[in-house]
Image (spheres, rainbow, N blue to C red):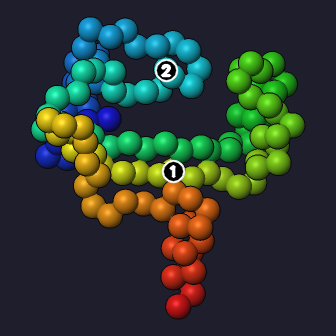
Amino acid sequence: HLMGLDVHDMENLGEQIVGYNNIPKSTQFGLKSLRLGRTLEPGFVLTIEPGIYFIPELIDYWSANKINTDFIHFDEVNKYRDFGGIRNEEDILITGKGNRILGKPLAKTIAEVEREREKAFL
């Protein structure tokens, strides 16, 4: 989503005004929760927050009711039901030539994550 004076600046105006322009919002599982579907312009600041959450009640409900079976392999998901979840958040500035990450880039590879984790024990 876009960022402004506040992280969720102007959010109460509604996603159709703030997050979308000339692009219809998807209704497909996995895409319908995207909060930004507009053409990016230099000077825009946005946050990218990919995450995954394992919510046992939803896993059980969706599995029992055969919901989203085209997208979810429930035998695999059940292995992680007690994990909780994780989200990676980075703030991005759109420039005339592309984009740049604001702040220090976050760990993404296993080795990078392990190096960050080890710092907690120093």
**Badge 2 is on which residue?**
32
Mark 2 vs 1: CB contact within 8 A: no
Toward the front, the furthest residue is 97
Residue 24 figure quarter = top left
Where residue 37 sits: x, y (%)? Answer: 33, 21
Where residue 28 sits: x, y (%)? Answer: 56, 15
Q: What residue type is labelled 2?
A: Lys
Where residue 78 sits: x, y (%)? Answer: 82, 43
Instruction: Measure the alpha-carbon separation of dots 2 and 1.
Output: 18 Å
Residue 9 visible in the current orientation: no
Q: Which residue is drawn at 74% across and 42% down?
A: 56
**Does residue 102 sit above or below 9 in this rendering?**
below
Q: Residue at x 71, y 24 (%)?
A: 71
**In-front residue for pair 49/56:** 49
Q: Which residue is drawn at 49% across and 20% down?
A: 32
Q: What residue type is labelled 1?
A: Arg
Would you say 117 lies left or right of 101 here? right
Residue 31 visible in the current orientation: yes
Toward the bottom, the furthest residue is 122
**Does residue 101 sit above or below 36 in this rendering?**
below
Q: Residue at x 42, y 60 (%)?
A: 106
**In-front residue for pair 97/28:** 97
**Badge 1 is on which residue?**
87
Tag 1 secondary structure? strand
